[in-house]
Amino acid sequence: MSRYSKRDRLIEKPEQISRDSTKERIEMFFCLMPVFGLIPSALALIRQRSSRKVRDVSQVAIALMLTWAIAYGAMGGVPTEGETLQVTAELMKATLSSGYFALCMYLMYRLYRHQAIALPSLKIFSERNESRSVKRDQKTDN
């Protein structure tokens, strides 16, 4: 007989742990790779066989990469006169790139911990689209 009660011996699993297959998780990790994750992300979105979770992570990865690329490109086109402005612009670009890399690593950590991977702005945008489609479906039903 154990000295612990039966309730204490049961292992409780956190609710956020999902039952993703190993193949899906590896594919999601590849999608979240900074810069180079664009290729597996695009392939996951194009293929119809990818699961919904992989496609969601791919959308997040592509949105992050495009945001970084647009911001980095916009900073590269700023005309600078003098060394002070040039150094400042280069520091801003380096900070932006480091932040992008760190955010990708953070999302990979969240994936490792079986937590949700989403950007708040994408979540708001997708909720708007879903509410519009629900309203449109309700209008067609009437």
Image: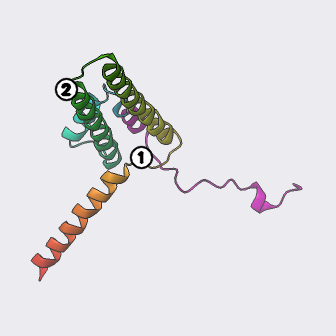
Q: Is residue 126 magenta?
A: no
Provide the secondary structure element on which disc 2 rests.
loop
In the picture, the quarter occupied by the C terminus is bottom left
Which is more toward the observer, 63 or 116? 63
Question: Is residue 12 found left or right of 22 in the rendered image?
Answer: right
- Outermost residue on the front side: it is 82
Where residue 127 sits, quadrant-wise, is bottom left
**Image mark count:** 2
For image coordinates 38% across by 38% down, the residue present is 24
For image coordinates 31% across by 20% down, the residue present is 86
**What segment is highlighted magenta in the picture?**
1-29
The answer to whether residue 131 is visible is: yes
> Pointer 2: what residue?
77
Where residue 101 sits, quadrant-wise, is top left
For image coordinates 18% across by 67% down, the residue present is 133
Provide the secondary structure element on which disc 1 rests.
loop
Kindly check if marks 1 and 2 are in contact, taking CB atoms under 8 A apart as contact: no
Which is more toward the observer, 90 or 70? 90
Label 1 packing within 10 angstroms: few (<14), some (14-19), many (20+): some
Residue 42 x, y percent position in the rendering: 22, 35
Which is more toward the observer, 90 or 83? 83
Residue 71 x, y percent position in the rendering: 26, 34
Question: Is residue 65 found left or right of 16 in the rendered image?
Answer: left
